[in-house]
Amino acid sequence: MRPEALNPLFVETPALEGVGPKLQRPLEKLGLKRVRDLAYHLPERFVERHAVADLDEAQVGENVIVALTVREHRSAPGRGPFRVLAEDAKGNVCTITYFGRAAYSGKKALPVGEQRWVAGRLDQYGQMLQIVHPDHVAESASALTGHVREPVYGLSEGLTQGRIASLVAQALKGLPGLPEWCEPGLVERMGWPLWADALVTAHRRADPAGRDRLAYDELLANALALMLVRASNRSQKGTPLLGDGRLRAKLNLPFALTGAQRRSITEIEGDLAQQAPMLRLLQGDVGSGKTVVALSAMLIAVEAGTQAAMLAPTEILARQHHETLTRMAQGTGVEIALLTGRDKGRARESILMGLLDGSIDILVGTHAIFQDAVAYKNLALAVIDEQHRFGVGQRLLLAKKGRRTPHFLAMTATPIPRTLTLAQYGEMDVSRLDELPPGRQAIDTRVVATERMDDVVGALARHLEGGGQAYWVCPMVHENEGDDLAAAEARYAALKERFGEDVVLVHGQLRPEMKDAAMERFSAGEAKLLVATTVIEVGVDVPNATLMVIEQAERFGLAQLHQLRGRVGRGQAKSVCLLLRGAELSETGRRRLALMRETQDGFRLAEEDLELRGGGELLGTRQSGDTPFRIASLEQIQRLLPVAHDDARLLIERDGGLAGERGEAARLLLYLFERDWGVQLLRGG
C-alpha cells in the first residue's frame, strides 16, 4: 500500500482546476497523468527578459519587456499576417506581428491609441524592428513583474507554456511535507536544498544544486530498489544445481568456445551450485555466442534433474532460439519445446502435459510461458533474453513457477557502458562476452551520401542478382512512429517497383501473423530484400543476408547502428553495411559515422556513445530511453550514481534497511519514484 503522505501527489490530473477531457490527451502524451508528474515536469530552460524604458536600450535578438503605444492595425489580404504598428516612449516604431488565428487575440489585446506593456523577443524584419507573437501583453508594468524570468517547458500539441505553468503551480502548491531520506552529511557537503524546496526552485530558476538533488533522489530510489531485490534474492532458498557434465559432453559444437564463453560458463556453474538463487546478467555483443552459454547453463539444470525455461521478447526470436538450441543439443537426448501465444488446442495441451510430467526438459517461448495455465514439474532455471524488455515484476511472476525460487540468467545483446550497467542491473552479477568467436569476419562498413541513392540501388540489384539477400532499414523520421511508417512504406513501394515480389516489408504495426509470414519468407530465402522500420526487432539470423543498408544513419545512436549492423556478417561470406547519410551532418553525427567505420567493438561503441550523448546531443533521441530515469541526465548519472549506490548500501547494511527512521523516509522515496516493487519484496512490505 502506498503511504498516505504521498496521496496528494498521486491525484490524477483531471482533478486539477481547468483540466477537462480536451486537455487530458496532450497531457497524457507527455506522460503527465498525476500531480507528481507535473511537479517533476522540469523546465528545459529559462527565458530571461530585460525590462527597458525604450527600444534604444534593447538589442536585436534579446527578450524584452517594453511599454508601447498602439498606433495602427494592418490586416493583410487572404491569410497574410496581422500587424500592429506601435511606438515606444521615444517614438521608435515597432511592428507586433500575429499569424493565423492569433490575430483575434492581437486585436483585442492591443487596441489603437492605448499603451500596453509587451514581453517578447525583439527581432528585425528589413529595416523595421518587430516582435512576433509576443509572450505577454499587459495593461500595467506590475502585471509582468513575475515574467522577467520564465521557465520554458516541453509541450505537446494542444498545450501552451501558460497552461503548463499554471498546472505546475497547482501541483507545487499541494506538495506534502516529507521526511529527509538523503544522508544528512551528504546533503550538507553538497549544499543541497530540502526535497520540496528543490522542486519549487527548479521551476523558478536554473539551480544546479537543486537539480542535482532531484536527480540524486531518483538515482537513490533506483539503487535502493535494486539492492532490496538483491538482498531479497540472497535470502531466498533456491535449488543448488550440480551437473555431472554428461549432457554437455555430448554437445557437438562446430566451433571452439572463446575464453570469455568458458569464463562465463564457469561463473554461472559456480552460481548454480549455491542455494541462494543465481541472479546474473550475461552481456554479449552481437554474435558473441550468448546462446551457447545459455544452453550450457540449461543443460546443467537438466543434468541436475530439473527443468529450464527461456523467455524471448518476440515470437520471431523465440522460434529462432528454439531452432538454434534444438540444432546445438542434437544428440544429447534433451527434449526442447516451443510455446507461444499462437499455440492452441491439442499441440498446446501436449506441451502443458509434458511440462507437468517432466518429459519436456527445456521450454522456449514468449510471455506465454508464465501464464497461469502453465505449470512445471520442477522449474529451477529461467533464462531471459533481451532483459531490458522485461520488468522486475515479470521476473517475479516467472519466479512463482518453481517449487523454490528459480535461478535467473538474463541476457542482453546491447553492450552497456559500465556506469549504466550499475543503473539498470545493479541487483545482478555481470558476465561479459567481450571476444568474438573465431572465424567471424569483420563487416565492411562504408558511409555513402544520400545523393548517391541510384548507385546504392544499382549495387543492391547486383547483390540480389548474385543470389545474396539484404536488409534495408528506413530512417527514423521523427519521434512519431506514424512518420517512420510512412517513410518505410514509401521506400518499400519504390523498391518493390524495381524488384517486384522479392521485397517484403516489416514494421511494428503489422499484425503478428503478417510480420511472421514476411520474416519467414525472408528466412527461407523466398524473399531477397527485407525493408523494415527501426521499431521492430530485426532479430532474424539469416546467414545468406550479407548487405545492410541504413538510411539517414546519422539520425541513429551508435548502439542502435551497431545492433542493426550485427544482423549481417553471420555466415562465411563477406558482409557489407552501407550507412546512407543526409546532407546536414552535425559534428556528433559525423563522429558517430566515423566510429562505426573505425571499430566493431560494441563495448567501445557503447562507452563512446555515452560520451557523445552526455554532451547533450539531440540526434539519436530514441536512445534517450536507454536509462531508466526521467530526471537524471547522463552527466548526472555518471557523476552521482556511484554516490547513490554507496549510500543505498549503507542504508541497507548499516542503518537497518527500511526499518529505521531514515528507512521509513526511504520507503516513501521508493513509492514516490514507483520503485515500490523493491518494498514489496520485503515481508510485510
Image (cartoon, rainbow, N blue to C red):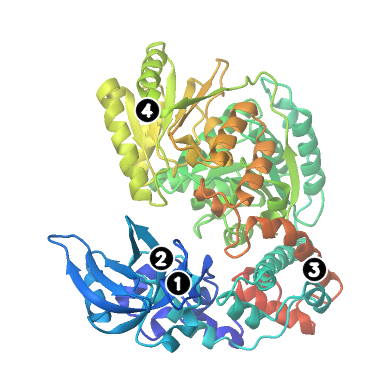
**163 w.r.t. 74: above or below:** below
Earlier residue among tags 4 and 3: 4
SS at badge 3: helix
- How many angstroms separate mark 4 from mark 1 (CA)? 63 Å
Earlier residue among tags 3 and 2: 2
Front of the two marks 3 and 1: 1
- How many angstroms separate mark 4 from mark 3 (CA)? 53 Å
- The amino acid sitting under disc 4 is Arg
Earlier residue among tags 4 and 2: 2
Point out which mark residue 647 bears: 3
- The amino acid sitting under disc 2 is Leu
- How many angstroms separate mark 4 from mark 2 (CA)? 60 Å
The reply to whether dot 2 and dot 1 touch (C-beta < 8 Å) is: yes
One can see residue 684 in this view: no
- How many angstroms separate mark 2 from mark 1 (CA)? 7 Å
**Residue in the picture at 62% in, 69% down:** 675
Q: Nearer the viewer, residue 403 or 620?
A: 620
Residue 24 locus on image (x, y percent): 36, 74
Residue highlighted by disc 1: 64
Q: Is residue 230 left or right of residue 367?
A: right
- The amino acid sitting under disc 3 is Asp
Residue highlighted by disc 2: 122
**520 w.r.t. 22: above or below:** above
Earlier residue among tags 2 and 1: 1
Residue 291 locus on image (x, y percent): 64, 35
- The amino acid sitting under disc 1 is Val
Earlier residue among tags 3 and 1: 1
* Residue 599 sits in quarter: top right
